[in-house]
Image (cartoon, rainbow, N blue to C red):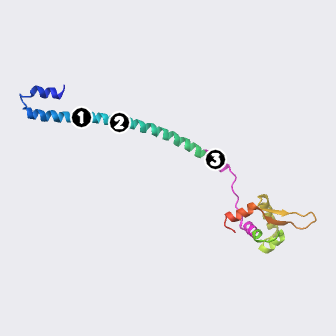
């Protein structure tokens, strides 16, 4: 039953006109507030639904990104590791970078005070990485070595020159 109808029924009997108008106005304001709250509630329900849908999408995207990260990590792990040169190999590269000519393994070993066999081994390793190249002579003369672009890049990128 409507409160306004109840108040109208007792108007003039229990309530005078002035109190009736005050009560009626208060109840009208409450009804307006109730309607506004209902409207706000509907808007909040819509917003909550949209947020829920967005959260679902973000969770799916998060799972897809986790899968992508795992895939990329496994691909990264399978890539060959950049091999670090030992100190003697770095010295040899720096020596070659400072040379005006093409020294032999014997000259490199003597200048750097390294074992000749070890020097030849290091030169072979660096040759297989295309850091150095050598002129090999068929008449028994010793090979002469020079620095290639990847060797220069290694020195430059590692702050060795």
Quarter of the image where the C terminus is located: bottom right
Query: Is disc 1 placed on a helix, strand or loop?
Result: helix
Q: Position of residue 19 (x, y in %)?
A: 9, 35
Residue 103 located within the stretch drawn in magenta: no
Q: Quadrant of residue 82?
A: bottom right
Task: Compute the Cα span from label 2 to label 1.
Answer: 17 Å
Going 90% across and 64% down the picture, which residue do you hit?
137
Q: Quadrant of residue 150?
A: bottom right
For residue 105, which numbered disc appears in the image? Answer: none
For residue 74, which numbered disc appears in the image? Answer: 3
For residue 43, which numbered disc appears in the image? Answer: 2
Please name the residue that numbered disc 1 is placed on: 32
Q: Position of residue 154 (x, y in %)?
A: 71, 62
Query: Is disc 2 placed on a helix, strand or loop?
Result: helix
Q: Position of residue 92 (x, y in %)?
A: 76, 68
Q: Which residues are magenta?
A: 71-94
Residue 86 located within the stretch drawn in magenta: yes
Q: Position of residue 60 (x, y in %)?
A: 51, 39
């Amino acid at each position: 039953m409507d409160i306004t109808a109840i108040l109208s029924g007792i108007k003039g009997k229990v309530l005078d006109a002035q109190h009736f108008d005050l009560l009626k106005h208060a109840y009208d304001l409450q009804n307006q507030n109730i309607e506004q709250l209902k409207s706000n509630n509907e808007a909040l329900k819509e917003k909550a639904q949209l947020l829920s849908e967005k959260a679902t999408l973000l969770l799916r995207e998060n799972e897809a990104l986790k899968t992508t990260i795992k895939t990329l990590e496994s691909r990264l792990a399978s890539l060959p590791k950049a091999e670090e040169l030992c100190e003697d190999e770095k010295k040899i590269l720096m020596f070659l970078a400072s040379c005006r000519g093409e020294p032999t393994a014997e000259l490199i070993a003597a200048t750097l005070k390294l074992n000749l066999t070890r020097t030849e081994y290091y030169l072979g390793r660096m040759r297989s990485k295309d850091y150095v190249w050598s002129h090999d002579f068929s008449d028994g003369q010793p090979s002469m070595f020079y620095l290639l672009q990847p060797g220069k890049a290694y020195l430059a990128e590692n702050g060795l020159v």
